[in-house]
Amino acid sequence: MAKEMVGINPIIFTNSAEISPIRNGAKRIIKDSVFRNLFSQKKYLLQLYQALHPEDKNVTKADLEYVTLQNIMINTDYNDLGFLIGNRLMILVEAQATWCVDIIVRCVMYLAQTWKDYFIRTKQSVYSTTPLNFPEPELYVVYTGDEVIEKKVIQLSEEFFNGRRIAVEATIKVITGSDADDILSQYIVFAKIVDAQRKLYPGNSRRAVTEAIRICKNKNILKTYLEEREKEVVDIMVTLYSQEEAVEQYVISKQFEAEIKSAVQSCRDFGKTVTEAISYLMKRFGFSEARSQKEVEKYWNL
């Protein structure tokens, strides 16, 4: 049975030392692809663990094992980084440049899938009378954006259910940088330098990327990693810049406007209310409620 489940499951463990850094689609930002690439090397993964658990002095690279989810069949989200420390801890880390508390829900989903794969791999059944044996989970979000996030911990119950006790709780630690010179703090500084250079050199991806790398190396920010993998980092970032720019051009194109118009008029023709049409645009295009209302008003009576 376990073998059959592994065969059909599109989400699999990554047990090698290398994790593919490129994501499907352009909606994922540049820095979290670099995040995955950086921590695909165990020497940097060990530094990440040491930043999270400075009290644990005895862990070595040999104690670390990747359990990052990899999507090999369908174009859906998968997590940024997951790893085990022996059989004691299971740590999942997400890198975010745009803040949204929905990350809590995604973390819960990633954890559930990672647990499922762990049980399959260790030949444990959730239907057995024997209690399951699995590592303690820890969930983290590394936030690199400009919004001030004062909370160091976010919880499912507080963010979505007004603090009421619910059947399933999740606690995620939020990392926004510190004065420490650890690898996570350096990564966050790197991400902010990338953003600054992109604003200085709009439309010139390669210049922005190379300048960001030059500045970081001069400031000893991820210097060894950038020296070792500079060409790879440039390729990752320029490729994803190009994808983002293509999406941005599409968003402002006439074709996109035609799609919005068609969506609004289809809602109307199929008997949907204006409110339902607004909700539909929010879900389909990711618009705000105000933007959706404006588009419905523009095309409803044409």
Image (cartoon, helix red, strand yellow):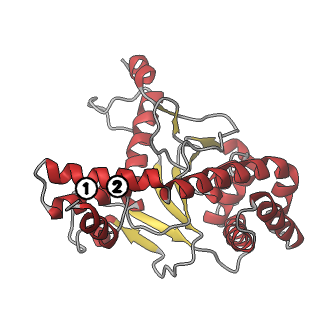
Task: From the image, tell me which residue sits under label 1.
Answer: 264
Mark 1 residue crowding within 10 angstroms, few (<14) / some (14–19) / many (20+): many
Name the residue: 40% across, 56% down: 257
Q: Is residue 224 left or right of residue 85?
A: right
- Residue 254 position, x and y percent, is 46, 54
Helix, strand or loop status at disc 2: helix
Name the residue: 65% across, 40% down: 19
Identified by mark 2, the residue type is Ile
Name the residue: 12% across, 59% down: 273
In this view, which residue lies farthest toward the left? Answer: 271
The Cα atoms of the two marked residues, 1 and 2, are separated by 6 Å
Measured along the vertical axis of the image, is residue 264 above or below residue 288? above
Camera-nearest residue between 114 and 124: 114
Mark 2 residue crowding within 10 angstroms, few (<14) / some (14–19) / many (20+): some
- Residue 220 position, x and y percent, is 85, 69
Q: Is residue 288 left or right of residue 137?
A: left
Measured along the vertical axis of the image, is residue 80 above or below residue 62? below
- Residue 174 position, x and y percent, is 50, 70
Which of the 4 image quadrants contains residue 34?
bottom right
Task: From the image, tell me which residue sits under label 2.
Answer: 260
Looking at the rendered image, the quarter that the C terminus falls into is bottom left
Residue 80 seen: yes
